Amino acid sequence: MKKVAFLALLLGSNLVLSSSVVAGDATAGAQKAAQCAACHGKDGNSVNSDWPKLAGQNEKYLVKQIKDFRLGAKEAGKGRTGAQMAALWGNVSEEDAADISAFFAAQQTQLGGVDEEFLALGKRLYFQGDAERGVPACAACHGATGQGLNAAGYPSVSGQFPEYAAKQLKAFASGTRNNDDNAVMRDIAVRMSDKQIEAVANFMLGLH
């Protein structure tokens, strides 16, 4: 219980520590985002679970991911890795990152149905967490409807592919993805079982 309380405190502190991001121009971003369409879809609703849906994602989170891919392309072991993304964003400007992020943030996410097999466990984990494992409720940061919190840089998880969401949670758990502030997601994901990860990832697909 103490661990859960500490994490809640830490998560809340990001509201103060998170740096401000200059708002982008969604209209300008529409044209700039054309380079993303092949994988993520014209409006950010990817049809392939290998590539995440960007539609409706919080602008501040998207800007951070673009910058992290840019950093990862320039400095080994830093930011976020990914050959395709690193090649695309290696030299992206601050303005372009903001505009593209604003465009996708303004789009509507396409939701999916929740597999009944995962509904009960996924719902319980999302809204209540697992005190025995030291896993806080996902809703504490990502909100009751999965929209996240843009001001703090917490991403929307509503409607995201379960395959992609589970892959990211497992990457945080293993440490292969480490661009989360204060290691918050790594600390949480490493405490989750594979069954829990699969359940909550599936539950978020239909969350709205």
Image: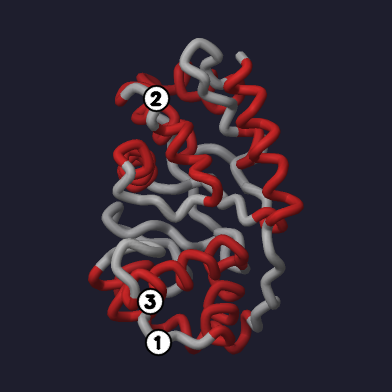
Q: Residue at x 46, y 71 (%)?
A: 66
> Which numbered disc flags the more N-terminal residue, 1 or 3?
3
- State which quarter of the image contains the N terminus: top right
Residue positioned most to the top: 132
Disc 3 crowd, CA 10 A, few/some/many (<14, 14-19, 20+): some
- 30 relative to 120, above or below: below
Label 1 secondary element: loop
- Nearer mark to the viewer, of 1 and 3: 1
Q: Position of residue 120 (x, y in %)?
A: 47, 16
The part of the image, by quadrant, that contains residue 72 is bottom left
Tell me which amino acid carries mark 1: Asn
Tell me which amino acid carries mark 2: Met
Q: Position of residue 99 (x, y in %)?
A: 58, 81
Q: Residue 91 got which mark?
A: 1
Q: Position of residue 157 (x, y in %)?
A: 52, 46
> Which numbered disc flags the more N-terminal residue, 2 or 3?
3
Q: Residue at x 49, y 44 (%)?
A: 183
Q: Position of residue 138 (x, y in %)?
A: 57, 32
- Disc 2: which residue: 192
Q: Residue at x 65, y 38 (%)?
A: 10
> Which numbered disc flags the more N-terminal residue, 1 or 2?
1
- Disc 3: which residue: 36
Label 3 secondary element: helix
- 148 relative to 120, above or below: below
